[in-house]
Amino acid sequence: KDVEPGAIVERWFEEIVPGETRTAGPVSVTEEEIVRFASRYDPLPMHIDIDAAEASTHGGLISSGILTIALRQRLITSIERNVSIVGAAGIRELNFLRPVRAGDELTLRRECLEKRESKSRPDRGLVTWQFDLTNQAGEQVLSSVDVVVVLRRPAA
């Protein structure tokens, strides 16, 4: 069922359907955000020093991969904020496919690949999501396959 983008919802494990897709975005990336984030969390020259970044193999300032992941998460929560999600069980794959730069407009596509009931916790299940993040040119900048723990519908 469709929900308002970013709405707080209660979508149980049983309501999530393999094959369903949703998109979100765009979100803009700014030079200030790249530098501010990296200055605190990933202070490599390609993220914080414009001159050094231009002289690097990247030919200019690029986002920290950690910031790119955070922007992906921001887009995920703009699809919906499901209160039935217990947390992440893991990331099976995480690929940085091309640099994210100031001025990029990022869009997210989420697809449910599969789901299965938990073997050890009958009140929950595991949902596997494919996330693809693309820039304004349609170029994929990040992909990941995440496994998320979602509560099952309580018995009536």
Image (tube, grey):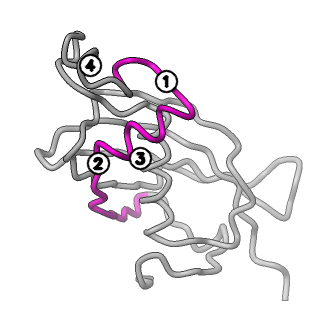
Mark 4 lies on residue: 53
What is the x, y in percent for residue 91? 59, 36
Mark 3 lies on residue: 131
Labels 2 and 4 touching (C-beta < 8 A): no
Real-space CA distance between mark 2 and mark 4, rounded to the nearest whole angstrom: 15 Å
User: Which label's residue is closer to the chain start, 2 or 1?
Assistant: 2
User: Which label's residue is closer to the chain start, 2 or 4?
Assistant: 2
Q: Which residue is drawn at the image coordinates 26% and 19% (left, top)?
A: 53
SS at badge 2: loop
Real-space CA distance between mark 2 and mark 1, rounded to the nearest whole angstrom: 17 Å
Range covered by the magenta-colored residues:
19-46
SS at badge 3: strand
Q: Nearer the viewer's eye, disc 3 or disc 4?
A: 4
What is the x, y in percent for residue 13? 66, 67
Q: Is residue 31 magenta?
A: yes
Q: Nearer the viewer's eye, disc 3 or disc 1?
A: 1
Quarter of image, res 132: top left
